[in-house]
Amino acid sequence: MMAALPYMQFYVADYLADTTHLTAEEHGAYMLLLFSYWQTGKPLRIDRLATVARIPNERWPSVADTLSEFFHVTETHWVQFRVEADLEAVNSKVVTASNAGKASARAKALKKQQELNDRSTNVDDPLQRNGNHKDTDTDTDTDKNKNNTPPMVDDLFPKFWKMYPNKKGKAAAEKAWKKLKVTADLFGQIAEGLAAQVVCEAWVKDGGQFIPHPATWLNGKRWEDEVKVASNVHPFPQSRHTGFADRDYTSGLKMREDGSYAL
């Protein structure tokens, strides 16, 4: 797991629009849970929820009943697939940047070596110099071709499997994954597409029984599908960035005597 980032994306307008039914106490608890999830990069343990949210034990059952709608609840953890997918998308970008940096370093090293080779052949016989130059160019071209090949990221399948909510047909899914020859860039696209679909209407309804098998999803390149977000799911932290002028940002807030608003 990569080191925790010192920041996370947060769109205030979207958050308020999707959580108008929460009390101030529930807002605080939800934010603390999200912060902890992002920092640790792991699902939240049920036996630690009240402590992480800083809610007294006697109050927690009521708060948990409301906040559980934002999570997939298992016997031992609260899982938010959106956060899981966002974490993997960020991680894939880090991997891509790292691979690009390594490729750049290799290219610089090859260029430097080429310059040294050229200098060393300046004192040789012209025919010998031409022969050496030809061999060096051939090797360099081969190395360049290797560097231009997108790096494979075989070790990311376990991360995809962890994110995907339908845990059926793992062997078939892994076979489909290998056929795709997933690079760091492609993994980023898969993670972003999955992040949108885990909160879509088709996947959320009826307990998720319409979520396709992972092999089917991969073979069909379903991460490219356009989906409709379910009305009862908070798609944090994706921003819709539309209809700002039509939104009532005071909905659910109380006006103070000085004209300002409070939760």
Image (cartoon, grey):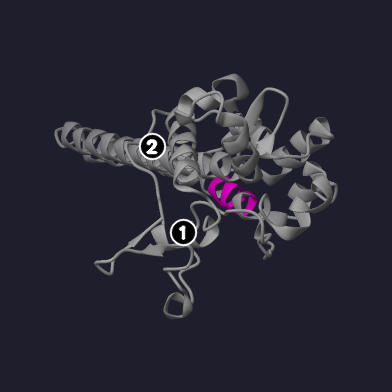
Q: Is residue 129 above or below residue 13?
A: above
Q: How many marks?
A: 2
Foreground: 119 or 124? 119
User: How much space separates mark 2 and mark 1, taking CA atoms?
Assistant: 36 Å
Query: Which residue is at 53% across, 47% downward?
Result: 188
Foreground: 181 or 22? 22
The amino acid type of the residue labelled 1 equals Leu
Disc sitting over residue 98 in the figure: 2
Query: Which residue is at 81% across, 45% downward?
Result: 207
Q: Residue furthest top?
A: 47
Disc sitting over residue 83 in the figure: none
Numbered range of the magenta stretch: 187-194
What percent of the width, then of the height, locates residue 184? Answer: 52, 42
Give the quadrant of residue 258: bottom left
Disc sitting over residue 16 in the figure: 1
Foreground: 243 or 221? 243
Give the quadrant of residue 168: top right
The amino acid type of the residue labelled 2 equals Ser
What percent of the width, then of the height, locates residue 41? Answer: 49, 30
Task: Label 1: state its secondary structure.
Answer: helix
State yes or no: residue 189 in magenta.
yes
**Quadrant location of the C terminus in the rendered image:** bottom left
